[in-house]
Image: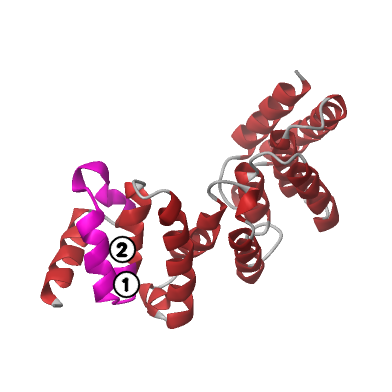
């Protein structure tokens, strides 16, 4: 019950705050945000005392650490507690990854370093290999990074390693295979692009995930133009 109370308090906190930058938050929203997160902190601490076998408690606590601006060491303590359960820690890793975003308490380089750690330790969770790609994809969409950034060899090597590792274990994950094709197109890796397009089922993907139908049609046209 303490876990669910904590989760509810987190939800109420974000509903009051909104999802914009700090300068868009009202004074009332900020007050409610802080109050509800303090409530969540108390509830989740009690939940962990009652049951220290659930990594989801730790994942929720990292969200609280992020919102309240708690120290890196406290966040890391909850991360390690979550890992110590031995259960799938995918959501835990995504929570830490978000805490490390430049718009919160870290930087792009810190996110990349943690993503590489996850890729090297896939025992953390079934989808942690995606974090390295997700870092770049988030940077592309949220920070409006130019497409030319992803044609550079270092960035493409990271993205290729992340998505190929995930798809080896999840070959039918069409959303991610389409993303793999999209980034191969940006990197002008024509051989890989054509290979991935042969494995994509158009009926199972949404072109909106890569910028719309016109982008998808251009990808296919460019692939056909390079023999």
List the residue tagged with mark 1: 186
Q: Say few, some or many: other residues with alpha carbon within 10 Å of mark 1 (under 14 / 14 to 19 / 20 or more).
A: some
Q: Is residue 90 magenta?
A: no
Q: Over which residues does the magenta segment extend?
A: 184-209
> In front here: 29 or 118?
118
**Residue 68: where, in percent of width, then height?**
77, 46
**Residue 169: where, in percent of width, then height?**
45, 51
Q: Find the distance from the CA under tag 1 to the CA under tag 2.
A: 6 Å
Whether tag 1 and tag 2 are in contact, CB under 8 A, the answer is yes
Is 119 on the left or on the right of 140, as rendered? right
> In front here: 92 or 70?
92
- Residue in view at x 41 percent, y 74 percent: 150
Q: Is residue 189 magenta?
A: yes
The prevailing secondary structure element of the residues shown in magenta is helix
Is 30 on the left or on the right of 172, as rendered? right
- Residue in view at x 80 percent, y 57 percent: 72
List the residue tagged with mark 2: 182
**Residue 48: where, in percent of width, then height?**
83, 31
86 is higher (above) or lower (below) than 225? above
- Residue in view at x 63 percent, y 50 percent: 123
The quadrant of the rendering that contains the C terminus is bottom left
> In front here: 22 or 72?
72
Q: Which mark is residue 164?
A: none
> In front here: 14 or 195?
195
Q: Residue furthest bottom?
A: 153
Q: Residue furthest top?
A: 1
């Amino acid at each position: 019950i303490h876990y669910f109370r904590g989760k509810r308090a987190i939800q109420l906190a974000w509903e009051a705050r909104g999802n914009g930058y700090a300068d868009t938050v009202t004074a009332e929203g900020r007050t409610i945000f802080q109050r509800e997160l303090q409530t969540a902190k108390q509830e989740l601490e009690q939940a962990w005392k009652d049951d220290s076998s659930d990594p989801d408690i730790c994942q929720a606590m990292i969200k609280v650490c992020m919102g309240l601006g708690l120290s890196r060491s406290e966040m890391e303590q909850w991360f390690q507690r979550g890992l110590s359960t031995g259960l799938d820690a995918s959501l835990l890793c995504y929570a830490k990854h978000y805490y490390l975003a430049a718009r919160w308490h870290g930087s792009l380089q810190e996110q990349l370093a943690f993503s590489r750690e996850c890729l090297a330790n896939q025992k953390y969770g079934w989808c942690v290999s995606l974090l390295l790609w997700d870092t770049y994809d988030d940077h592309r969409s949220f920070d409006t990074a130019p497409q030319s950034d992803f044609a550079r060899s270092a960035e493409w090597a990271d993205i290729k390693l992340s998505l190929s590792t995930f798809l080896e274990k999840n070959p039918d994950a069409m959303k991610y295979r389409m993303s793999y094709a999209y980034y191969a197109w940006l990197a002008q890796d024509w051989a890989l692009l054509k290979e991935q397009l042969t494995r994509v089922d158009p009926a199972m993907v949404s072109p909106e995930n890569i910028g719309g139908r016109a982008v998808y049609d251009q990808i296919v046209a460019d692939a056909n133009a390079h023999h």
